[in-house]
Image (cartoon, grey):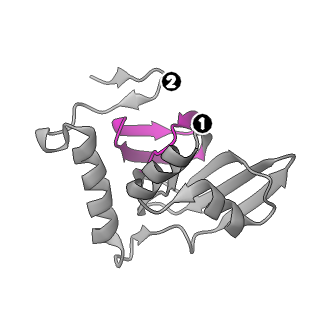
């Protein structure tokens, strides 16, 4: 039986005890990221088709991810909206557990969120970020961090 999260996204049954805590899930996602780096059905996102749009202090980033891919996202400094525009994914986050969702769907990622995603079908996923930058590489540098240690330092300084 599926349960629903606050934003009506179906959630899978409870995770196994080895993924019971936020720290366990965080460690699992980073371990998965390390394990899949050289696999043909994984991606760091840097070679996947991206569309960038900038308008009035916002950066809209849309990515196309083929079916059967396993990838992890970056750690974002700020909460931001996400839109699953096409396809079906299963994802795990440190806060949300294991979730399977199909388009159309929207959700808000909290600051510091990192996720691992498996695409069951071809997927189009879009995020919206606040930034004055007009350069994708500069925007990513401003909006994300490489580690949770860096995220904690960012929080302390801001």
Q: Is residue 1 above or below residue 48?
A: above
Nearer the observer, 141 or 95: 141
Identify the residue at horizontal 60%, vertical 50% (top origin): 125
Residue 58: within the magenta? no
Residue 114 is left or right of residue 26, and the answer is right
The single residue placed furthest to the left in the displayed view is 17
Q: Mark yes or no: residue 35 visible.
A: yes
Name the image quarter holding the C terminus: top right
- Structural distance between the alpha carbons of marks 1 and 2: 13 Å
Identify the residue at horizontal 55%, vertical 34% (top origin): 107
Q: Dot 1 surroundings within 10 Å: few (below 14), some, or many (20 or more)?
A: few
- Which SS does the magenta portion mostly show? strand
Nearer the observer, 44 or 2: 44
Quadrant of res 70 = bottom left
Q: Which residues are magenta?
A: 85-114
For label 2, the residue is 7
Q: Is residue 63 above or below residue 109?
A: below
For label 1, the residue is 104
């Amino acid at each position: 039986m599926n349960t629903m999260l606050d934003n009506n996204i179906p959630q899978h049954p409870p995770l196994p005890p080895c993924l019971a805590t936020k720290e366990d899930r965080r460690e699992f996602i980073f371990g998965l990221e390390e394990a899949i780096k050289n696999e043909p059905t994984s991606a760091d996102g840097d070679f996947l088709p991206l569309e960038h749009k900038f308008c009035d202090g916002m950066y809209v980033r849309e990515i196309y991810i083929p079916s059967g891919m396993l990838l992890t996202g970056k750690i974002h400094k700020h909460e931001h909206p996400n839109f699953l525009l096409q396809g079906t994914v299963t994802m795990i986050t440190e806060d949300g557990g294991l979730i399977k969702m199909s388009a159309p769907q929207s959700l808000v990622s909290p600051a510091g969120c990192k996720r691992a995603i498996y695409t069951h079908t071809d997927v189009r996923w879009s995020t919206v970020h606040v930034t004055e930058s007009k350069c994708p590489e500069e925007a990513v540098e401003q909006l994300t961090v490489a580690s949770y240690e860096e995220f904690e330092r960012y929080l302390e300084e801001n």
